[in-house]
Image: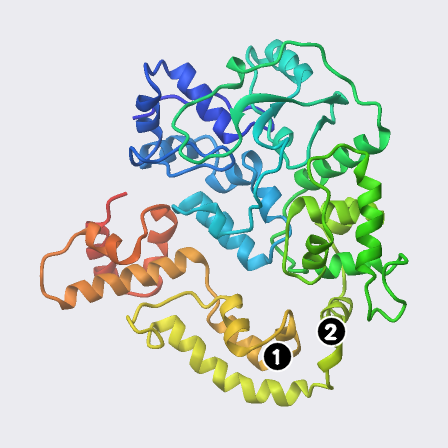
Amino acid sequence: MIAYMPTIYPDELVYSWFCRYYVHSGCFSHKMALQELFCKKSDYLNKEFIGNLNHGAIEQIEKIFPLDELVLNHTMFPQYARFIFLEQKETALYRLAHDTCDAHHLFPILPRNDGEQYLRLCPLCVKEDREIYGEAYWHRKHQIRNMRICTKHKCRLMESSVPAKSEQSFTFCPAESYTYDGEAIFENDSLAIQYMEYLVSVFESVMDFESDIPISSILYDGMSRTKYLKPSGRSRYTKMLADDMGEFYGSMGICSVASMYQIQRVLLENLYDFSVVCQIAFFLGMRVEELTASSLTKERIQQEQDSHYMRNTAPVDWDLLDRETAPVLEKFARGVYDGTGNENGRPERVSERIVYREMGLLGHQLENMPRCKVVFEKYTESYPESWARKIIWAYQKLEEEDKPFYWTDIRKILGVKKNMQEIVPCLIKYVDEDMVEKILNLIVF
């Protein structure tokens, strides 16, 4: 049982926080500290995210920080989720905070290049941290892909001997034990400093959980003010852009310069890599706010979306398509929602991604179909509401078998195990108080 967690420092990785817990708690072994924080012996320390915390650790941590805020402000989530679609972003945040999952299943994480293999630190930040806090710690922004300069002190970051990968890491490596005591090497390339400051500004910007503007549309708008997009908007000069970017970034000494293939994939909405997007945007002269708080109109977004399909496009009768699709969508959404459309009868959350995929719609076309939009919104719900319905379904399914069952049996069917405090209040929306009481009697928090 955790009785104390040290204060978490500004821009500190959760992994760094746990390393300092290991030091401050007096645990006599890494194994003991791991058991106090995580669920199973096989749970490893995640360098970039949080990991599979046990209920005692979650309870103690939530007294200090809501888990959602911990993910947003003390993990590398903003690097990987910044430019993905809104629904995917919300799912990733929820699952990283309240569920057990592999981050690779939530958003693309590219293999590491040379220069990104180990955790990095700034020698002047180390000195400053020791003076202010009495110890050094791992800073988030120093671990951003392609980051090689401390933007605060304008000196080069130094690699530690601590691997940045999380795979099978069961050892706590506090920054204080792996610090660099040599002289700071200051950067004299002003353009490189500007680019690194740009990366940090994008990384630290508030995450947008309201609008859902594709990054391809944002970059398309940025390209429209340059020679890399025809005035008609129908052709992108991607090879010219890639060649010019290669020359521009080649002398900066960054770990990885975006390839033409990566640039094409970003512009065609097939890649959302933070480093590639930032390289394109910085080269095009786009402001940070254009990437992180875009105000593009629906018309402008649709213009970019249509540019992907110019050869096969034909005028669309949106009213006819809406009238024909609405009843089909109603039947499909109801089947997903109540489970009648699933082989196992399990109810699921009606997500925007599922609707677009099953209805064969392209990005943002639902905005042109008011009847379908009403149907979709009728079945829209939060994740806790969705899990509450699933718990009720599992309870009733087990009850029908007329055999004794327990909370572990429900968990086996659903996989739910965390964040029950948010789910429980939603139960009353779907069943009466007697049924809620029966379920609560089974739940183990």
Please give left or right for residue 220 compared with residue 41 in the image: right
From the image, tell me which residue sits under label 2: 306
Element on which disc 2 rests: helix
What is the quadrant of residue 306 in the picture? bottom right
Please give left or right for residue 299 compared with residue 57 in the image: right
Element on which disc 1 rests: helix
Say which mark, if any, is on residue 129: none
User: Is disc 1 in contact with disc 2, using a CB cutoff of under 8 Å?
Assistant: no
- In the displayed structure, 196 sits above or below 236; it is above
* Residue at image point 45% right, 34% down: 46
Quadrant containing the N terminus is top left
Name the kind of residue labelled 2 in the image: Asp
From the image, tell me which residue sits under label 1: 370
Residue 154 picture location, percent across and down: 77, 22
Quadrant containing the C terminus is top left
Looking at the rendered image, the disc whose residue lies closer to the viewer, 1 or 2, is: 2
Compare marks 1 and 2 and give the one earlier in the sequence: 2
Residue 191 picture location, percent across and down: 84, 33
- In the displayed structure, 3 sits above or below 100; it is above
Please give left or right for residue 142 compared with residue 8 in the image: right
Residue 18 picture location, percent across and down: 44, 25
Name the kind of residue labelled 1 in the image: Pro
- In the displayed structure, 150 sits above or below 430; it is above
